Amino acid sequence: MRMNRRNVLLGLGTVVTGGGAALGTGAFSSVEADRDATFSVVNDDSALLTLTGDGTYVTGESSGAISFSFTELNDNAKTIFEGVLTIENNTQDAASKDVYIKNNGNVDGTVIDFQDSADTEGSIVGTGNAVTLSDTGTITLDIEIDTREGDPSSVDTITVVAEDNN
């Protein structure tokens, strides 16, 4: 076979195609690898975001959870429990946090509402109602339960969200 430009290009194309098929592209779609890791979980009173209760309606558990105890609520009525939950930012990283209660189920601002005690119109349920806490700031909350709007007994979890506000 005589060497000409066409034969050289054909030969190089064959080598490149074969090499690419043999070696692959280097891309992958999934990797799973085990690594050692250590995590430390602390009770709320030592956490970066501290949740403390008034001791009567909201109490701390040894597991680090908090427990809400609102019994004998009147049917077809709105009941407000003042100053029963305090949230404190303990991050000490000079970054303020936007804090709110996630809107889920009956924790939606109608059946159960968490309100800033210092602000009569201060619901903090939902991302649009976040309050800003400085790096050592606190907020005390009132909890409003309105049985006219629904049954609060189905609520078994609340989610407190704290996000950097920068």
Image: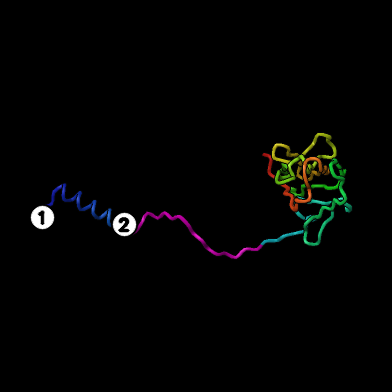
Q: x, y percentage for residue 84? A: 86, 47
Q: x, y percentage for residue 31? A: 49, 59
Question: In the rendered view, how is the structure colored?
Answer: rainbow
Q: x, y percentage for residue 130? A: 73, 39
Q: Amino acid at mark 1?
A: Met
**Crowd rating for badge 1 (residues with CA inside 10 Å; few <14, some 14–19, many 20+):** few
Which of the marked residues, 2 or 1, is nearer the chain's N terminus? 1
Q: x, y percentage for residue 82? A: 87, 43
Residue at figure coordinates x 83%, y 35% from the top left = 119
Residue 96 seen from this side: no
Q: Quadrant of residue 22?
A: bottom left
Q: Is the residue 95 above or below the residue 44 in the image?
A: above
Q: Quadrant of residue 28?
A: bottom left
Assign the N terminus to one quadrant of the image: bottom left
**Crowd rating for badge 2 (residues with CA inside 10 Å; few <14, some 14–19, many 20+):** few
Q: Amino acid at mark 2?
A: Ala
Describe the element under mark 1 as helix, strand or loop.
Answer: loop
Task: Assign the magenta stretch its main secondary structure.
Answer: loop
Tag nearer the camera, 2 or 1:
2
Describe the element under mark 2 as helix, strand or loop.
Answer: helix
Q: Which residue is mark 1?
A: 1
Assign the C terminus to one quadrant of the image: top right
Over which residues does the magenta segment extend?
Answer: 20-38
User: Which of the labelled discs sits on residue 21, or is there none?
Assistant: 2
Residue 154 seen from this side: yes
Instruction: Out of 107 and 3, give the one closest to the viewer.
Output: 107
Q: Is the residue 47 above or below the residue 134 in the image?
A: below
